[in-house]
Every structure is written in C-alpha cells, then in structure tokens.
Image (cartoon, rainbow, N blue to C red):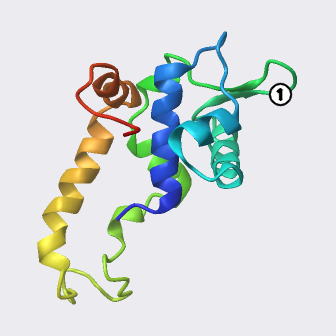
Amino acid sequence: MLSNSSKYAINAVLYLAINSSVNNKKGVKEIAETLQIPTAFLAKILQVLAKKEAICSTKGPGGGFYLTEEKAKAPLASIVHYIDGSDKFAVCLLGIRSCSEEIPCPMHYAVKPFKVRFLEELEKHSIEYFAAKVRNGEAYLMV
C-alpha cells in the first residue's frame, strides 16, 4: 500500500526522532547504512522532506538532518502525503483507475476497512508517538 519512498521516509523520520537533535545532526550515509536504505535514494527523500519543512537540515561541516520536538508533533500521515501525495490512500490496490464504490475492483471491499483504519492511525498519531514505541522496545526499525 505504501511506496518504497514512503516506507523509507517513515523509517528515516522515526530514526531522526529517536537519534537526532539540533546538536546531534545525522548524515545521509549514517541513516542509510543503519536502516539499510540506498544512500542516493534516501538523500532525495530527505531533501524533499527538508524542502517541505517536515525535517530540518543544515549544510556544511557539522551539518546533517535532524528533527525538532515541534516537528515530531506532526502526524505521521504528513510524511506519506509529502512523499506520495494526499490521494495515496484513495488509489486502488490493484491499480485499476476506475475502481470506486460504484465500480469496485475484486479487492475493493476487502481492502477498504484496512486502508481506512491505517490512514486513521497515521493521521491520529504523531511521529513522536511512533518513535516512542521504538524507544520503549514495543516496536523496531531495524532487526
């Protein structure tokens, strides 16, 4: 349901929420190696998120990416919206353009409750909420 770009973005933002601050910026290479994400791909994703002001970045020596407490209060859904657009959850799982309530694909009604609940969770809970789950050992970014 999520693109690789959104998956990588979520992982990277949660990593930053847990491991970074204005005094402890993280470079793309470190994040990519830790999360096992292709470095060039992650760099593009982080640049988009920084441009959209979802995360912070500084250039030069001692530069890198970080997340402020304020930005960590944003709903996790915002990261998906910045990367994949706001209609990501309206798209048919099978990729059928005409899929709708009136003309459903074979999977429409099976997937709809999951998509609705998933989006509700991402919109209801902040980046910090999910980062706290990792910090507390309730969830994991890396195995």
x and y percentages locating residue 64 in the rendered image: 73, 27
Q: Residue furthest front?
A: 143
Q: Would residue 10 appear left or right of 129 to someone viewing this image?
A: right
Relative to 98, residue 27 above or below: above
Relative to 87, residue 77 above or below: above
The residue nearer to you, when weighing 45 against 27, is: 27
Q: Quadrant of residue 86?
A: bottom left
The residue nearer to you, when weighing 30 against 45, is: 30
Location of the N terminus (image quadrant) = bottom left
Answer few, some or many: residues within 10 Å of disc 1's Cα (few below 14, many 20 plus, some between 14 and 19): few
Q: Residue at x 70, y 31 (%)?
A: 27
Q: Would residue 53 appear left or right of 143 to someone viewing this image?
A: right
Q: Quadrant of residue 73?
A: top left
Location of the C terminus (image quadrant) = top left
**Residue indicated by mark 1:** 59
Q: Quadrant of residue 134?
A: top left
